[in-house]
Image (cartoon, rainbow, N blue to C red):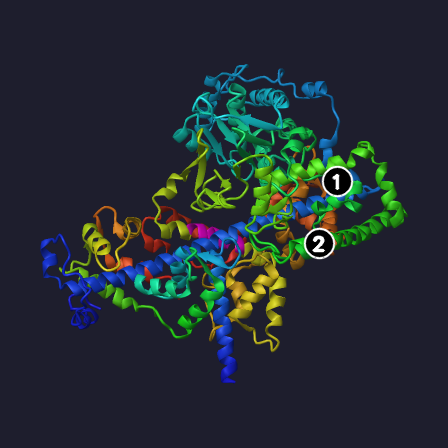
Amino acid sequence: MRPEQPPAFFNTHARFRRKTAKPCLTPLTSHHVLLSPPAAMRAALLIQRWYRQYVARLEMRRRCTWNIFQSMEYAGEQNQIKLYKFFSYLMDHFTPASSERNLIAHIFRENEVCRDAEWERYFNYKNIEVPEFYSGPHLNFPLTATNATELVEAFRTKQQLHSRYVLQLLVETWKLLRILPNINHVSTCHSKEITICGDLHGHLEDLLLVFYKNGLPSMETPYVFNGDFVDRGKNSMEILLILFAFLLVYPNDVHLNRGNHEDHIVNLRYGFTKEVLGKYRVHGKKILKLLQKIYSWLPLASVIDQKVLILHGGISDTTDLDIIAKVDRHRYVSTLRPPKQRKSSAKNKQSDQDSWDEDNMTRRRVRSMTYSSPGVSRPEVQRHSLQTLSSQVEEELRERRRRAGFSLSHGDLHNSLSSDSDSDPGENLETDAEDWKQVVDMLWSDPMPIDGCVPNEVRGGGCYWGPDITREVLEKHNLQLLIRSHECKQEGYEFCHNRKVLTIFSASNYYEVGSNRGAYIRLGPDLVPHLIQYQASRSTRDLTLRQSVGRTERSALRALREQLFAHKSDLISAFQEFDPEQTGLISLNHWATAMESVLQLGLPWRMLRSQLVNHTQDGKLNYQSWFKELAIMEPNTQLAHTNLLETLYKHHSNLETIFRIIDTDNSGLISFEEFRQTWRLLSSHLQIDISDEAISDLAQSIDFNKDGSIDINEFMEAFRLVDRTQQERSNSTLSGVHPHLLQSEHPTKTLLVSASPHFV
Amino acid sequence: MAEDRENAIISEVHKKISDAFDVFDHERNKTVDVREIGTIIRSLGCFPTEGELQEFITEIEEEEATGYIRFERFLPTMTKLLMERKFRPIPEDLLLQAFEVLDQEKKGHLGTEELTKYMTQDGEPFTQEEMEEMLSAAADPDKNVIFYKDFVSMLTVDDK
């Protein structure tokens, strides 16, 4: 259509002047006078309709992206907990003779009983020299406000604190935390407003932004930090050091609640362990050890003016603040493990916490669960899972015993359980399990919209609680509001349960740049929460909606395509079931069904279709070529055991976690033998068959230096899936000014396995 | 045979509607906030006016408006709408024509003030927020004008 010609559509329609049409635009500029008003009006209306439709499509994409991130996050958490429970169970039910026991025992090192005096000696920092060339901040103890402020400034300019000061700061923090009660009692008197922050997850940018907007912690500006300071982000260490420094300076005005990530087992998977070891090569191990201690001494909750309860995850139908106030909190070094699982896991009513049954995990819809009849389904879940668990482990044990030349019958097994030495007197069992449940529920639970309380199967720990539980618990303790964190929200906060529960999340751009805002709360004596939202990244603030959606979406789809790669053979066979004639084609409806049945991510596949499927033939999908186009390149002929490779990708994070557990001296290296043991453990956990030869081949091929040991980081890196076209395009995407550059963002690209130089 | 095919199509349409609805059903109880209905309908490929949208909502709302729309009321009406191809897509060339109507002097671009005036005072006016978002995507930041041909291709590009 050439602009100089009068557009036909509008002229034709302009003849039918509608009564509703506004007579003219006011005020008018000169050339507007010439315009026929109804035509302009129609034009405006049409543009508005188009634009609103466009925005709606973007919004849909934004939500879908959100769903992808969230469901993958929770699937990961669930894997972690399953893996952990597997270890835990083996640990509890194993005969000491078995060789892997030592290995598994590494996870549970926290059970070492040590006198405090010994710990202090262990953590001695005084003989660590601070070299002259060190240009970072210096600390003097007792710490002053100036010190703390300097620390913030130093981290803002990307300096690092010397390990001597780190250890000293941590030891001081540990000493202080030990005298704090389980529940911080805070008051807003003197018309002080209290600021409450949710998950920070190593996002230093966000913490600095909060300080910038709201002021540094001080007597006038008290803070509650509601857990999950660490993991995921790059600056967890800096965040901890800043928070601890202000805690030491203002012990009455800075309050820390423990989160589910303040747990060294969780840190193994979600990056904090790696961060610490990377930043502190010499003293990293000590720092980690000390942090375990500190975590276990973090208070569990805060209560403001006796009316507002603040805790990280939430509550359950058994939550009782009076019990929580008396719990021996430092016994729960990792909240993933009950202090005494042995007998309780077999017979006790507490055992729903142990359920990790595969079948019941299959419905992983984000933030959803089997609603139908929680009251009925629960015992069912429990029984079923215990049976499965028993039989799995029985089989496993038989195999181990055979190898170890042992013979032990099922009956003996349970009898032999009490032979463990680190146990407490039997009569405390019940109380221990109850106390532990109190703590786990506080750190791991999520609210749900329907009444009741059911185990949190999506995350694998804690529970889901309903509005009725909120009412009960608040009433019982004469409280009016529950503030919790633990879940990322697009706006940084969200009310639920009739505004009696408020979720606060302070890490903006959590999943990806542009994915969500962060927020914090200011609470004055009227106890009405004032919410302040923000978004930390400078680069995103100027992006248009379209640009930021596109960017976040690309990253989500990339992650999703890695999943496709990892599940290729399952997907292909699911597609083939819908293609009995072997035409190579399936309908898009079948495609969506197969995707959900294999990946179990609870995603709106039909909405995602246009982002994932580019070409169809008469409305049908050629799935083989779709795979070629979308997901896969065989990385390396040496490793042509496709199944092994797929397994590797599928359980990438589990594998890394086990490696890090095995690498007890934190050297970053593991031996071939340890590598083999890892695989054996992983394969028995997943009940898959991997031959020893395949593992040996793999080990040989990745011994890059041929020195008989394997570098964990290098190993994980070598198997990272890299999106080739992503890299190619990154330049144009980053400049991102002209929308046209962002047009071709459909996932037509191929995922490649990065070619590590050693592979070529 | 034809009936089978018809049923298959309907079942397909149902699944699609259900998927789109679920994306906004945050509480997973088969309801969505009434303010999201527009986004759902539009993301299913419809181009209703605000007026038409309002009519649609009135039709499916509870007798006593709760602020939420139930899936069981949404599904049949939406299915009908898609099967009858109501609110059909407006051809792209009309979008370009619309801009050309506003661009009286045939400059190939519109000033931001000019466009703002049309969009916020005429038709079904944009809110301040909508307007700002549109300009941030459409306007050339240096010249303060909208080269609407580029903008049109941006709006229409990712439709397949």
Residue B159 visible from this viewpoint: no
Answer with the quarter of the image where residue A520 lies: top left
Sequence-wise, the earlier of marks 1 and 2 is 1
> Do the residues marked 1 and 2 share a common chain?
yes
Q: Viewed as shown, does residue A155 lie left or right of A639?
A: left
Q: Secondary structure at mark 2?
A: helix
The chain carrying label 1 is A
Q: Measuring 51% from the left and 76% from the top, which residue is drawn there?
A: B8
Q: Amino acid at mark 1?
A: Ile
Q: Who's the residue at 53% across and 44% down the image? A: A487
- Number of other residues with Cα within 10 Å of mark 2, as a class: few under 14, some 14 to 19, many 20 or more: some
The image shows residue A458 at horizontal and vertical percentages of 61, 50
Label number found at residue A104: 1
- Tell which of A550 and A720 is nearer to you: A550
Where disc 1 sits, the SS reads helix
A754 vs A260, nearest the viewer: A260
Q: Residues within 10 Å of mark 1 (few under 14, many from 20)?
A: some
Residue B91 vs residue A701: left or right? left
Point out the image quarter for the N terminus of chain A.
bottom left
Residue stretch in magenta: A551-560
Q: Position of residue B154 (x, y in %)?
A: 32, 58
Residue A292: say if magenta: no
The alpha-carbon separation of the residues under discs 1 and 2 comes to 27 Å
Q: Going 50% across and 36% down the picture, which residue do you hit? A: A198
Compared to A351, does A152 lie above or below? Answer: above
Measuring from the top left, give residue A404's x and y in whole percent: 86, 45
- Which residue, given by chain and number where applicable, does mark 2 sit on? A381
Of A495 and A736, which appears nearest the observer?
Answer: A495
The three-letter code of the residue at mark 2 reads Val
Subunit of label 2: A
Percent position of residue A645, x then y: 64, 55
The answer to whether A512 is drawn above or below residue A9 in the figure is above
